[in-house]
Structure formats: structure tokens, C-alpha cells
Amino acid sequence: MKEKNANKKVEHIHKYVVDNTDKRMTTNDGVPIHDNNNTLKGGERGPSLLEDFIYQDKMAHFDRERIPERVVHARGSGAHGIFEAKADMSKLTKAKFLKKGTITPVFVRFSTVAGFKGSTDLARDVRGFSVKFYTEEGNYDLVGNNIPVFFIQDAMNFPDLVHAVKPEPDNEMPQAASAHDTFWDFISLMPEAAHMIMWVMSDRAIPRSFRMMEGFGVHTFKFVNEEGKGTFVKFHWKPRLGVHSVAWQEAQKISGYDADFHRRDLWEAIDKGHFPQWDLGVQLIPEEDEDKFSFDLLDPTKIIPEELVPVQIIGTMTLNKNPDNFFAETEQIAFDPGRLVPGIDFSNDPLLQGRVFSYADTQNYRLGGPNFHEIPINRPVNGKHNNQKDGFGRQDILKGNTSYFPNSTGGGCPYHAMLNGEKGFESHAEKIDGRKIRGRSTSFADHFTQARLFFHSQSPEEQEHIISAYSFELSKVNDPKIRERELAILHQIDKDLAKSVGKNLGITPPSTLDPLTVQFAKQNHPEYPIQAPTPEVTVSKALSMHIQPGEGNIESRKVAFLVADGVSKASVDEMKAALEAEGAEAVLVSTHVGKMTFKEGDTEEVQHTFLTDASVCYDAIYTPEGDSIKTLMQEPDYFQFLNEAYRHCKAIAFDKGAEKLIEQTLIKKVDEGIILASKGNLTKDFIFVMKGHRVWEREKDRKVAV
Ligand code: HDD
């Protein structure tokens, strides 16, 4: 078979793909079904008969169609793709899939964390970024997030964190939201969460698209080379489309217009051939430099600023095929940071060490037992050979009478790699010498320096969004003591930040940490609070998402063309051609679906209307010229489109004759993001502004509230 965009894994699972086209319906045993509408009855109006095995076959399967959703990251979307290694890393790692020029199939799953499986894509939340590499030496899973740090430092706290953020246990509210008492109670008692929370309150937690977010392995891992030498490594995924977000008010509205916004965006992009790409970057730290920094490399609440250790690009991932079946692939894929291949190893990060148990354990439960490795999407492309046998759902038929090792009956097979002079996975032979303790290193006790670094690295507009996010979330908290406790933490990070949030909450921020916060922190660090070490950098450019007009690209961005019958085809076509030349997409939004007639007499089918769509679902807005302008003048929802786009700092273009519509909007100033045909080059200027993602300048004096 040669499927479009096939790779070794896609070919590997092809034998399991079922196509019902032209096939007769059968039971699960292959018995042809004559009538799939009626149960077997005693007489036309009579009772159903127990012997109706065809009904039972159908219903019994249906009754078991749901499996437990993931305890976290339940809501996700996935795609197939390939990873191409592009740099020579052989001095540092023996991982074969990282050998320059090697192409490895991957399956990626993006997710939100807190919401249930059917919750909105646009929740304020961390996004999961999991990649399964089907390498020639087995599956390697890089199970990361779109935020480079984590809430907690030790896996022991993970169930508590998740219980706190999930809907509250008595009334199961709220859904897919952290804005509630139990979450902020936990967070305000866990100062180690301060850094991650700052990221979650930033626009990073409401991405424009899965395709426009970074991914991070979070922990420090290890590369191990042929000689057994280790090098610390942090993994970064850098999206080719740039890192972009929506605004919080947009996120809330998008959830209503299209709760599947991110899922649809990924699916449609791949379907249309806009294959999303990420470069894989690494920060490398020689083992000798482990103690060189003001923070601990093993602490998952810390980044290594890119100014200290630059990110080197070592490969590129391209997602180029949608799954054939959501459940079989995206739902049943089992990720596990404990799946390593030779050349990559864990560090001693206590969060990572704890994860290694949890994932395999949860898959055993969620996927119904120990044979989840045999589900097609989870199978390694290089095959598996061992003496594991039996168990629920076993698929492989193990040949012969031998299922133990050592054996002579099976010729000693499957054999240990070492017996044949080959090499299997060998753990990095790190020297370990310590007492057993339940505790934490003092080097993990500085909780605020990097939260401050993040806040200070943001643009003024990004900082404003962070202030609004804290204000929104804490306003939803009912217990005033919790609000005040969190404000005390903010005061430790940045006094102005605390003051601004405090103003919105009607509280003066306390100047010292709450005694309860200190009491809990002391349980991990008896000497808490410590004197924070001096950081190497206080601002890091890589932490801000903001770019200048013209700086980014507009590939696959969606532009709403606001039209009605009588619109000029020439005006539509010219802008469309210019946008498509840059990879962007024009979508006609009109007063009605169905046939729309152009001024020139041609017609076009329209799928989107002012009723079904809103400007929050688009990146930029264009009003072409034509007789349609008269209709739009009478259309309140047209003005709502413009006002909202203006509020959210988007590029808005008007062709000849359309600019008079501005008078009826809330646009009071024709800034650089309002592009008029009468001033300059309409298409070029529009694209230039779109390339800056938003016209942030506008936030300063915008007075529009829609
Ligand atoms: Fe986790 C799922 C990412 C800490 C326990 N986690 C899960 C997924 C992602 C992450 C992306 C979804 C995988 C998928 O798409 O199927 N988790 C992280 C990151 C963490 C992290 C980046 C910190 C750096 N997780 C973490 C800890 C524990 C877990 C400390 C427990 C000790 N995570 C799980 C889990 C999940 C999971 C319970 C739920 C479903 C699954 O594993 O497959 O095992």
C-alpha cells in the first residue's frame, strides 16, 4: 500500500485499518446480517426473544464503548508525522533516531489538562505536547507541555495538585477552569508553584492554535554517548508559525462559537496541506557544569534562560496525516516518559522519577491491562520480542513452548543483546551515594526569582494580560483569605503586580507571606524562606511572545471577508490572491449561507454567516468594495464583527468605498492596524500588519468594550 504521506508507522498500522466500502454487514463473528433494524420477536407485536444473538452482539459492544478518560489531559487531539534529525549529535548521544538524516515516524497528541474529555479547547490551561517517536530501537516518548516549568517539585504532590484544580468534589464545578477556591487554596500554600502560575496567567495558556505553541520536555534529561558519558539536556519544540495566543475575552467567546476550535484548526490545517512544523532544539549542559547555575538543574520549576545556554536546533518535526479513527489512535495512544531508547536517560529530578511509575500504571488501568502495547498505535515499528504472555486482550501468538529465560528449549531466545555482542538500553552509570531521606534539597527553595524573571520579560501589554488573568481568577475565589494569601505571594515577586491585582480585588497586598504558606513551605525546607541567590539574568527575550509588524508569517491564518450580495469579485479576488500567496486563507462571511451573487454576476457558495461566526474566530478582517456595502450598513452583526476585531487589536482592512462604514463603528482612531485602500498599498499593508499578529499599540487607548 502507498497511502498519502505514509511513513513506516502509518504502513505498520495499515493492516488494521478497516474500510467498509462495498462490504456486506456482518456480526463481530463475520455472520452476514439480514436485517439491522428489527429485533427478533415472538409475533409482530410480541416480546423480543432471548435468542437474538445479532441484537446482543450489537448491544453488548455498544454497552462497553466507553473507557475511562485520562485522569488528566483527557481532552486531546492527535496527528501522525515525521521527525528528521538534522544535526550531528553522535558525540553526545548514541540515540540512533538523532543521527543526522534519520527520518522517524511520530504521533503527537496535544491536550488541555484539567477539563473532561468533552470540555472546551479554549480553557485557560497548560497544553500537553506529547510526541511518540517510533524509532528503530523502540518507542521513545517525549511527554511535555507548552510551558517549560511545572507547578510542583515532587511527584508525591501530583494527586493533590490535580484534585485541587479539577472540579470540586462536592458539586463537580467548575469544568475546565482553575478559577475556583480549591485550586487557589492549594497554589497559595505552595510557593513553589509561583513560577508556573505566572506562565498560566499569561496568554501562553490560551494559544491561538496547537500549531503556534512551543513544546518543552520540562525536566532536565540526559544524553548518553557510546562511551557512556552523560550530558544534561533540555528539549524545546519551536513552532515554525511562531508562538501566538488569543486574548482571554476571545477565548471565552470562542468556547461558545466553536468549543473544538483547536482540534478543528489542527485537523483542517493538515487536511489542506498546511503541515505544521516544529524544530527540535536542545540546551546542552556538560555534567561538570551541573552546579554552575544559581538554580538547580534538577528543579522542574526552573528554566535555563536561553541567554545562559542557547537552544541548538537538531531536527524538524512535520505533522502531515490526520488519524483515520479518533478512538483507535488518539484515544488509545499511551504515552509514558519512562519509555526511553539507548542514548537518552532520566536525570534525578524527583518529579520525573515519580512520573515514570504513574504513566505505565495509568495505561494499565485505562486501556484494560498489560497488553496495551499491542494496540496498533502503541506497537513499536521494530517489533517486540520477550517472554511476556497472556493477559486481557492479548493479540500476539507466541510460538513454541518457551516463555522464560534462560532457556535451552528455545535456543536461548529471545537473547540478551549482550550475549550476541550487541548493545541494548544501558542506564547511565551515574554514581549514587546517599542516605535515604524523605525531603528536599535547599537548592530547590528559591521560588520567586524566576517568576519575577518571567514577569519582567513580558511586554507592557503582556503584563496587563497577566494582571487581568490573576484578577479574573482570584475574583472567582469565594474565600477572601485565599485571595489575600496569593496576593502576598505576588508581592514577593513584584510589588506593582501585586498592587495592580490587589486594586481589582479591593485588597492591599500584605507585605509578608501568609503564616500558613510559610508553615507548609517549612515542611519541605525547614530553613524557609531562604535568601534567594543572585540570578544570572533578570530579563530574557525568549520569554515574550510579542513580535513587531512584518516580523512573523501569516501562513494558514484565517481572514474573514465580510460580504453580501453585490460584493465586487475583483475586490475579493485581488485580496484573496495576495493572502494566498503568503499561505493565508480567505473565508467569506455573509448575511446568509448558500449562493452569493457578485456585482459582476458570478455566484459563489458561502458557508459562514454573521449568525454562525464571530470575529474572535479569525485573525484579520477585510471589507471588499461593492454594492454589498449598502447591505452591511444595515447589518448590526457586521459592526459587532468590526468592533470586536478592533478591541482585540487585529488588522482590519477596507477597500474603496467601504471606509465610510468606520463611522458607524466604535473605531475612534485610524491606527496602523486600520488599513484603507485610499492610503498606501491595501494588500501589502494589510499583510505587513498581520505579520505582527496584533496591533498591541491599540491596547493603550482602546475604549471599546464588546
Ligand atoms: Fe503528566 C498525562 C505532561 C507531570 C501523571 N502528562 C500527561 C500528558 C501530558 C503530561 C502531556 C498527556 C499524555 C497524552 O496525551 O496521552 N505531566 C506532564 C508534564 C509533567 C507532568 C510535562 C511535568 C513536567 N504527570 C506529571 C506527574 C505525574 C503525572 C508528576 C504523576 C506522578 N500525566 C500523568 C498521568 C497521565 C498524564 C496520570 C494521565 C493520562 C496518562 O498519563 O496517560 O499518568
Image (spheres, rainbow, N blue to C red):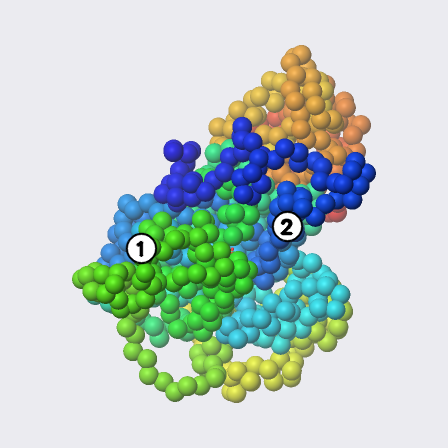
Residue 123 lies, in percent from the top left, at 64, 54
The correct choice, above or below, for 154 with respect to 415 in the image is: below
Dividing the picture into quadrants, the one containing residue 669 is: top right
Other residues around mark 2 within 10 Å, as few (<14) / some (14–19) / many (≥20): few
x and y percentages locating residue 491 in the rendered image: 62, 73
Element marked by disc 1: loop
Which quarter shows the C terminus?
top right
Q: Tell me which corner region of the image, top left, top right, bottom left or bottom right, holds residue 103.
A: top left
Q: Nearer the viewer, residue 219 or 461?
A: 219
Q: Residues within 10 Å of mark 1 (few under 14, many from 20)?
A: some
Q: Position of residue 685 (x, y in %)?
A: 55, 32
Of the numbered discs 2 and 1, the one sitting upstream in the chain is: 2
Disc 2 or disc 1, which is closer to the eye?
2
Disc 2 secondary structure class:
helix
The image shows residue 297 at horizontal and vertical percentages of 40, 70
Indicate yes or no: mark 1 CB to ligand 1 under 8 Å: no
Where residue 137 is drawn, which disc sits there?
A: 1
Judging by the rendered image, the residue that carries numbered circle 2 is 60
Q: Identify the residue at horizontal 45%, vertical 56% (top origin).
A: 394
Kind of residue indicated by mark 2: Ala
Is residue 486 placed above or below 36 in the rendered structure? below
Q: Quadrant of the N terminus?
A: top left
Q: Is residue 579 visible?
A: no
